[in-house]
Amino acid sequence: MKRSEFADPFEQARNEQGIGKMQDQDDPVTMVLGLKDVRKCAHNWQTFQSGAKPGRIVVPSEVKIRDTRQIPFEVDPPEHGDYRAIVEPWFKRPLEDEYRAQLRAQIESLVDQVLTQDDVEVVGEFSLKLQSRALTLLLNTPYQESDVWIGWGTHVFRSEGEALDGDKASILYDYIDAQIERAAENPTDDLYSVLLNSEINGRKLSKEEVKGVMILTFAGGRDTVINAVTNSIAYFADHPQSLARLRDQPEITNRAVEELIRYFSPLTHMGRVVTEDTKVCPHGHDVKADSRISLCWASANRDAKTFENPNEVVLDRKVNPHVAFGFSHHNCLGATHARQIMHILLETLAAKVGSIDILNAKENIEDLDQFKRKVGFDSINVKFNPR
Amino acid sequence: MAKIIFITSDSEKIELEATSGSVMELAVQNGVQGIDGDCGGVCSCATCHVHVAPEHFAKTGPASEIEQDMLELDDDANEYSRLCCQIEVSEQLDGVVLHVAK
Ligand code: HEM
Ligand code: HEM
Ligand code: FES
């Protein structure tokens, strides 16, 4: 099997049961697998809520390691909409020319750098750097801050071999607390300051709320972007003709971005807490009030009822109604930023890179109990060859 | 060349002309309010939702099955809803009136 092949572990269960089962710290999860069912459950926030105990909708559950509510992620409508209204304009800034130009400069210089190396460990030396530097644009903080974040390594929340690590997570929490204090004393035009100065229903956002937004911006945009970037490098290593194609047909770049994100689905699933005894379709499986379901974006994105050749990367897939960025109320706030990163990355690789050799790779397999899913790589060493 | 008329939720009327591309692209290029086109036109984001004026529905035709699956869960959708990234500009559209949903 090619390194960039990502199998679909959910196919049989999706077709036969429509659901999967996962144990997680005595709080089991019914995974919803089909595209239409995932969409329906995502839309039905009254029955499948996000505003449960903080940490509970994340799988594996984080109720034991944090109390801070992530905003807007762990809030339901109508309050959810009030918070989104505050942050949405800010998260659209990646569409501005100036932002894109800076992002392009960052990505081009990183690609130039790795082209001079014989051996690049992509996760740590490329994707983490790219993600951290790009985040300085999204937060509008000094570029040098990215060195701090890169220093944390790829797993801010996890020690070797351990899924969740409260001590490690506190590095991030302490950092954000300090930044909020700094911004409260000396406001700049960064996201911390803008949030501290924002109003919701006639009052200022509290520091705890600002923290909730900032943690989410760090956590939600880290592994997801790192996996999207790393896996795309693996894909182009196995498919140099696709780099050539993007060079010849730059007009398909947008479709290629969406297709790679569908195929890799960097966020496998996200949970909800059930508010009443009900059924999740299509075979009418019962779920109980106060139990958990998850919306399995990764499975939905391989649903053959909607996607032709779901297990292939069809670079110019024209109609691609994927849910890799979620669906309905909670759809990804960072999607504009993530899409710009991917778009500029593909253009830059096509322009500068002729081929990529994989030297060594260690897969990252997510353990979902009934399913084992490859989400990315723990490490992957490559050589980038110039055109 | 086809003339396409957008009416935004603020009742602003915007008349545009085009020969090719999708209706979403035309709207985004001209900053039509309420059409964001987040996914670039692959039918994944539903930020390009319009209601076709009923008397012009024959010009665009109905939503495809994949579009309908998306629209089914949109609280503003009705029988004249389309995701306008899925409407290609052609002579056939000339004069069409589209009400922006958002
Ligand atoms: C390829 C990269 C990314 C993927 C695949 C991705 C995926 C997702 C998905 C599936 C959701 C929905 C969660 C749910 O329904 O519960 C989501 C929500 C969210 N994402 Fe992303 N994400 C990515 C990048 C980012 C980035 C770069 C940021 C910010 C820096 C970010 C911030 C958020 C936030 C704040 C939410 C919560 C939105 C809400 O609850 O209203 N994401 N993301
Ligand atoms: C305070 C909030 C969060 C904390 C403490 C946290 C913690 C973690 C931890 C501990 C892991 C490693 C899991 C394992 O190895 O089994 C992880 C992985 C991951 N997280 Fe989060 N997370 C948070 C929020 C989010 C959000 C909001 C998203 C997306 C919207 C997200 C996306 C991911 C992804 C895609 C991975 C898999 C990365 C990989 O294994 O390569 N996280 N997170
Ligand atoms: S632009 Fe995304 S669905 Fe039309």
Image (cartoon, coloured by chain):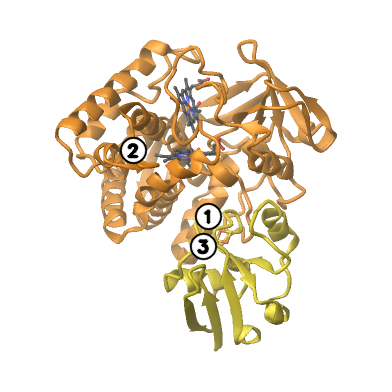
Question: Which tag is nearer the camera, tag 2 or tag 3?
Answer: 2
The image quadrant that residue A49 belongs to is: top right
- Tell me how far mark 3 sits from mark 1, CA to CA: 6 Å
**Numbered marks: total:** 3
Which disc, if any, is residue A71? none
In the picture, the quarter occupied by the N terminus of chain A is: top right
Give the left or right position of residue A287, taking residue A102 as reference. right
**Badge 3 vs badge 1, beta-carbon distance below 8 Å:** yes
* Residue position for label 2: A203
Label 1 element class: helix
Q: Is residue A103 above or below residue B3?
A: above
- Tell me how far mark 2 sits from mark 1, CA to CA: 43 Å
- Could you say which is closer to the camera, residue A271 or residue A135? A271
Which comes sooner in the sequence, label 2 or label 1? 2
Label 2 element class: strand
Residue found 61% across the figure and 75% down from its top:
B88
